[in-house]
Amino acid sequence: MELKALNYDTWVFAERFVNTWLPAGLVGGLLLFTGGLLAYFHKGRARPWGIGAAILGLLTVGVSFIFLYQPSTQAYMKDFGHVTPRARVEDPTFFGYQATSGALTGIYAMVRNDDDMRQLPMYSRHAVTQKVRYAGDANGSYYFYVGDIYSPINYIGPVEKRNVAAPYLRGYRYTLKDDQYKTIGFINPVNATTMALVIPNSLKHRPPTNDVLQNAKRLAKLDTGWTTEEK
């Protein structure tokens, strides 16, 4: 069965259930059930209350599992598996939300991660391009300059040959469909996702100069506005 995409309100409800109400219900239900059984098998006036507590505990656990397997909860758990620090800078916890490590979000800002990003229902995906200045190619690497960055780029990712006038980077930019998601830690990724370097069919091979080879850096090492080209 195909799961329906969640909106903001349904996401927040499912997230709070999975991270707070479900563990509380399971732990509380098991404690009631265990305590009820102990009271039932203990001689004394607590015995009638024990069977009631045990039944209530079983009902609590049962209701928790019923909600766990609801379509909205299952859709949340499926989508949450694709959430990374590139998309979200706060993690859900039992008591609310906790900020993700700045070092981790900085690393993920440069990760391509398109396979996960395209699965998240709260994002729209827009094609983007940026022209580059070809500086040669050798041994499977293409060298070029992008924007106003002084250092040349050493690119080893996917390359597409097309009938175009000049080389350019091709990729996607992801933006939130609903800004309410920002209140629970989702962001608009700063860098565009790098999918390929597009080069003209007519581009003539030329080796990079020694200066280019000695100073070239990878996309992920410079603030180019693009992610790494590697998956």
Image (cartoon, helix red, strand yellow):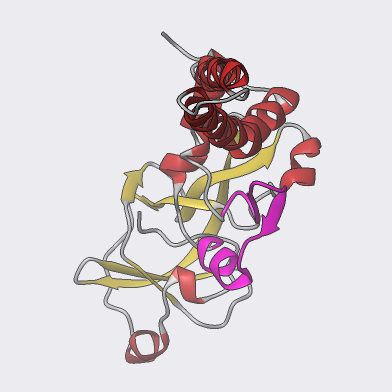
Report whether 217 appears left or right of 182: left
Q: Horizontal and vertical percent for residue 67?
A: 57, 18
The picture quadrant where one finds residue 21 is top right
- How many labels were placed on the picture? 0
Q: Nearer the viewer, residue 24 or 80?
A: 24
The residue stretch that appears in magenta: 86-109
The picture quadrant where one finds residue 191 is bottom right
At 51% from the left and 68% from the top, the residue drawn is 107
At 45% from the left and 56% from the top, the residue drawn is 167
On whether residue 93 falls in the magenta region, the answer is yes
At 52% from the left and 61% from the top, the residue drawn is 108
Q: Nearer the viewer, residue 93 or 22?
A: 22
Q: Horizontal and vertical percent for residue 173?
A: 60, 45
At 73% from the left and 28% from the top, the residue drawn is 8
Q: Nearer the viewer, residue 48 or 56?
A: 48
Report whether 207 appears left or right of 69: left
Residue at the outermost left position? 139
Q: Horizontal and vertical percent for residue 189?
A: 63, 52
Q: Horizontal and vertical percent for residue 199?
A: 38, 53
Report whether 33 appears left or right of 161: right
